[in-house]
Image (cartoon, grey):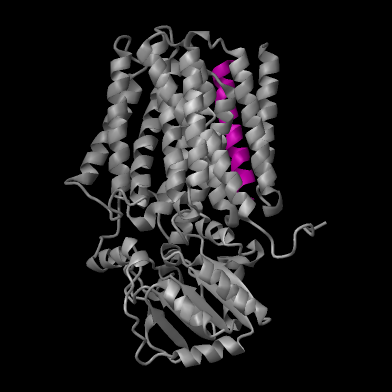
Amino acid sequence: MSDISYYVLCSLLSLGVLYGIRLMSRVETAARGNQLSALCMLTAIVITMVHTDLAGSLSYIITGLLIGILLSIFLTIRVRMIQMPQMVGLLNGLGGLASALSAILVLAAGERIKTFELTASGLALAVGAVTFSGSMVAAAKLHNLMPQLPMLLKGHRFLMAVSALILTALVIALPLVHEGRIGLGVILSAVALAFGYLFAVRVGGADMPITISLLNSTSGVAAAISGMALGDILLVALGGIVGASGLLLTQIMCRSMNRRLSGVLFGVMPKPEPEVQLADNASGAEAASDETEEKPADTGASLQNAADWMAQAQSVVIIPGYGMALSQAQEKVKLLCDGFSSKGKRVRFAIHPVAGRMPGHMNVLLAEVDVPYDLLCEMDDINPDFPSTDLAVIVGANDVVNPAANTAQGTPIYGMPILDAGKARHLIICNYDSKPGYAGVPNPLYEPRPEVLLLLGDAKDSLDSLLAMI
Amino acid sequence: MSIEVILVLVFIGATLLGYRLISAVPSLLHTPLMSGMNALSGVTLLGMLAVTSLTGSILGKLLGMLGIIAAVINVVAGFGVTNRMLRMFKGGRENGEDGK
C-alpha cells in the first residue's frame, strides 16, 4: 500500500471511531456508536493482517487470536454488572501489557533503531508496565482477592519516589546506550512493575474510581507511545483518544470526590482512622451476606409515619449507593419505583457522580433491572428539586448525602459536592449500620428526627418492609 | 514533514479532539464509555501483529502471542461488554417512539 493511501485510510478509520464516540453522547444512538467503532477496528485489523507478511510467526499469531477471542467471549458473557469495575481494571491492565510487550519486541528487533523510536519504546515500556501491575492490583482489590484497605509498606513514599527516579533514569538512558538494550529493557520493566504495584496497593476503596479512570488513561497513552515507536498512525490516534477520555473522567471523579489528583498520585492519603476501617469492613463483603437484627431508631419516626409519608408523597427521589449494589437490592428498588409510579407519584433517581466503584457504575446497575434511563438524574439537575421533594429514600448511600461535607471543615469530605437529600420534606434511610461511611465522617442525617426514618440492616430486608406498605 | 513530527501532531490532535467529543458524553454512560475505551486501546493489536511477524526468536514469538492475546481480549471483550451494557439502557416510553 502506498504511503498516501495508508494515511488516508488511517484518517478515515480514526474519523469513524471519533464519530462513534460522538454518537455516544446520546443514549439512543450510543449502541450504534459502539458498533461503528468496533467495525472500524475490525477493518483496521483485517487490513493490517492482509498487508503484513505474517508468514514467519503465523501459527503463533493465529493461536494468540483464537485464545484471545475465546477468553473474550467467556468474559463478555460471564461478567456481572456489579463486577464491571474490576473488568475495566483487568482490561486496562491487559492494554498496558500489550503495549509493554510490543515495546520490548521493538527493542529486541534490531540494532538500527532511531533515537525517536528508542525513546518511545522505553516510555511505552514504562507506562505499559506500570499500567499493567497497577491495574492488576486494582482489579484484585475490587474483586476482593486483595484487602480493600490502603496497604502501606514501610517507607512507602520513599520507595515510590526512588522507583520513580530509577524509572526516569532508565527511560533516559535507554536511547543513549548502544549495547545491552534488552537487558536494560528488562530491568526497566521490573522497576515499572514494582512502581505500579506500590502505586495501586495504597489506594483504598474510596479512591478506586479515580484510580481506575487514571489507569484507563495511561493504558491509552501507552498504546499511543508504542504507536510512535512503530510509526503506526492509527495506534497513536486511538491511543491519544483513550488517554484523553481517561484523563477527563479522572478530572470529573476528582472534582466529585473533592480530591486533588496530586494527592491520589503521590499518596497524600487522609490517615486511615479506626472508624474508617470499621465502616469499610461493614460495607464490604459481610454487608451482603449476614443478616443483622433490625434495630428501629429510638426517637426517630416509626414505620407507621413512613407509611403515611409514602401514601401522601407526590414526588419521590430515590438515592442509591454502593450499599444497594452490595446487598443486590436493585430489583427491590425497581419494585419500589414501580410501586410509587403505579400510585401516580413522580419517582426519580438521584445519581451522585461517584456512586458505585467507577464512573457511571450506578446507572448501569439500575439499567440492568430495567429502570428507564430518563428517571436517572445527575446531581446538578436534581439538587434544586430536593426542597420541593416530599420523600427521599436513601438506599445504601452515606457520604454522598452527608451534609457535613458543607460544614465540617478539616474532614476528608469537606467541600465535596453532595446530593441535598436532607432538604427533602421526609427522609427514609436504609443503611447497613449507622456508622460513618468510607470517609469516616459522622452523618448528621442519622440523628433521630421526627421527619427521618432510619432502617438499619440489609437493604433487601429494609426495602421489603417498605414494599409491604405501598 | 518527517514521520516523527506527523506522529506527535496526530497524538496532540487526537487527544484534543477526543477530549472535546468525550466531554459531551453524559455521566449516565460513563461506564460503557470506559469499557469502550478499553476496546480502543486494544488497537495495540495492530502493533503486536507487526512486531510478532518480524521477531525471529521463539521467546519473541511467545511474547508476541501473549501480547496478541491481551490485545484481542481488550478489543473483543471491550466492545462486547460495552454493547451488552448499552443495550440495557431503555427509555421510559415504549419502544418505537424514540424522538421521531
Residue B12's place in the image compared with A258, above or below, is above
Front in this rendered view, residue A22 or A255 = A22
Whether residue A338 appears in this view of the structure is yes
Whether residue B1 appears in this view of the structure is no
Does the segment drawn in magenta span residue A273? no
The image shows residue A419 at horizontal and vertical percentages of: 51, 71
Query: What residue is at 63 percent from the left and 67 percent from the top?
Result: A375
A279 displayed left or right of A415: left
Query: What residue is at 41 percent from the left and 69 percent from the top?
Result: A399
The image shows residue A439 at horizontal and vertical percentages of: 34, 65
Furthest residue to the left?
Answer: A154
A180 displayed left or right of A398: left
Furthest residue to the right?
Answer: B100
Residue A200's place in the image compared with B92, above or below, is above
Query: What residue is at 44 percent from the left and 72 percent from the top?
Result: A460
Location of residue A458 by image quarter: bottom left
Does the segment drawn in magenta span residue B12? yes
The image shows residue A238 at horizontal and vertical percentages of: 57, 32
**Secondary structure mostly taken by the magenta-highlighted segment of the chain:** helix
Range of magenta residues:
B1-25
Query: Where does the N terminus of chain A fall, quadrant-wise?
Result: top right
Give the total of numbered labels.
Answer: 0
Residue A30's place in the image compared with A7, above or below, is below
Location of residue A120 by image quarter: top left
The image shows residue A342 at horizontal and vertical percentages of: 66, 78
Query: Where does the C terminus of chain A fall, quadrant-wise?
Result: bottom right
